[in-house]
Amino acid sequence: MVDASVVIFDYDRKNFIRDIIKSIAANIGDKNIEILVIKSYEDPEIDNFLKNNNIRFFTLLEHKSQSDYIKCAVNESMGEILMFHDDDDQFVDEKVSYVYNLFSQHEDLGYYHNNFNTVNQKGNIVYNRNYKTPEFAPVYIKNSSKSWYFNKKIKLLNHIRPDFNSSSICIRKSIITGFKKNFEFNVRPDTFLLIMALISDFSLFFDNKVLTHYRLYGENVSTSYNAPVTKMRNTFIKAFSEGTDIFSYYSHFLEDTPYARYMKLRIINLKLAYNFWALERKYKITRSELKLILKVDLVHESGYYIISVLPAKLKIMVMKISYKAIED
C-alpha cells in the first residue's frame, strides 16, 4: 500500500532527474512512499536508469502542458498525498519525511505549502529581488476558519503567496480528482490547486519552513530585472494578460462562496499590472474596485494603481528606476 507519491515533472531538461531520484530515495526510508516520474521525452539511458531503480514513469509526447502533467499525476499516482517536484527545483533532505508525518498526524489537512529560497544552476543559494523568501509565522487554517482568513487576512496571504511554485505544494489527491476535466489550461495551474483546496472540506497549512530550493535560470531572471525595456515589457504583458484570463475562469468556481472577493482582488491586481506594463489602460478599474483595494490595505496594489494611470513616459521612467530596465 502506498500512502504518498512524490511526483517529479521532468520538462525535457534531463539534467537533474538522476540526482533528484537518488536524493528522494535516500530520504524515504521505510515509509510507504512511491516516486513517480512524468516526463516529456524518450531517452533510453534515462529510461533504463528509472527501470533499474524500480521507478514508475510515464512519457507525454503530445500533450505536454503543465496541466497535462497534473492530470497524469492524478490518474497514475498510487498515493493519496501528492508531493509535486519540478525537475529543476530541489527538495531539502527532510521534506519528504516531514510532509509525510504532517499529513499522517493531521487527517484534516488537505493542502500544504512550504517556504522556499532561490538557488542558481549550480544549486548555490542566491538572492533575487523578485523571488524573495517571505518571512512569516506558520499559518494552519482549519476548514472552519478558511472564510475568515481569505477575507480578513488577504494582505498576509498575498505576502505568503500560498499558490507559488508547484514544488512547494502538497495536496490530497481526493481534492483534485473531481476536477480533472477542468485542467485544460497551461497558465497558473498551481493557483487552481489552491482553489480546489479552498472549496474542499479540508484544512490548509502555509508553513514558513524552507523545504524547497527554487532554481533560477538566466532567462527567467533576465526578463524580470535589469533587462531591455521592450523585452521586459513583452514578458510581463503576456504573463498578466494570460493571468487575467485564467483567473477570470477560476473565479467561476468561487462564485457564491466566501472566497469570491479574494479572487476578485487577484484579478484587479493583474489588470493593474497589465495597464502599467502595456503603457495603456486596457482594463478600466472601477471606483468600487479601487475602494476594495484600499479597504484591505493592499499597498502593492495601491501602488500599481497609481503608476498605472501615469503617462507612458513616466511609466518607462518607473521601469528604469524600480526594475533597472535598460534602453533597447
Image (spheres, rainbow, N blue to C red):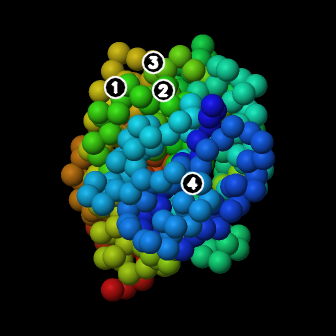
Residue where numbered disc 4 is placed: 55
Q: At label 4, which amino acid type do we have? A: Ile
Whether residue 272 can be seen here: no
Residue where numbered disc 1 is placed: 253
Q: Which quarter shows the C terminus?
A: bottom left
Q: How far apart are marks 3 and 4 (CA)?
A: 42 Å
> Who is closer to the viewer here, 118 or 19?
19
Location of residue 3 (image quadrant): top right
Q: Distance between the residues labelled 1 and 2?
A: 14 Å
* Residue at left offset 42%, top offset 53%: 58
Whether residue 199 can be seen here: yes
Q: Where is residue 271 in the image (x, y as percent from the top left)?
A: 32, 47
Q: Is residue 38 left or right of residue 63?
A: right
Residue where numbered disc 3 is placed: 258
Q: Position of residue 215 (x, y in %)?
A: 58, 66
Q: At label 2, which amino acid type do we have? A: Ile
Which label is found at residue 283?
Answer: none
Q: How many labels does the image show?
A: 4
- Say which label, 4 or 2, has the lower sequence index: 4
* Residue at left offset 29%, top offset 46%: 185
> Who is closer to the viewer here, 145 or 84?
84
Q: At label 3, which amino acid type do we have? A: Pro
Q: Of circles 1 and 2, which is in front?
A: 2
Q: Distance between the residues labelled 4 and 1?
A: 36 Å
Q: Tell me the crowding category of disc 2: few under 14, some 14 to 19, or many 20 or more residues within 10 angstroms, Cα based.
A: some
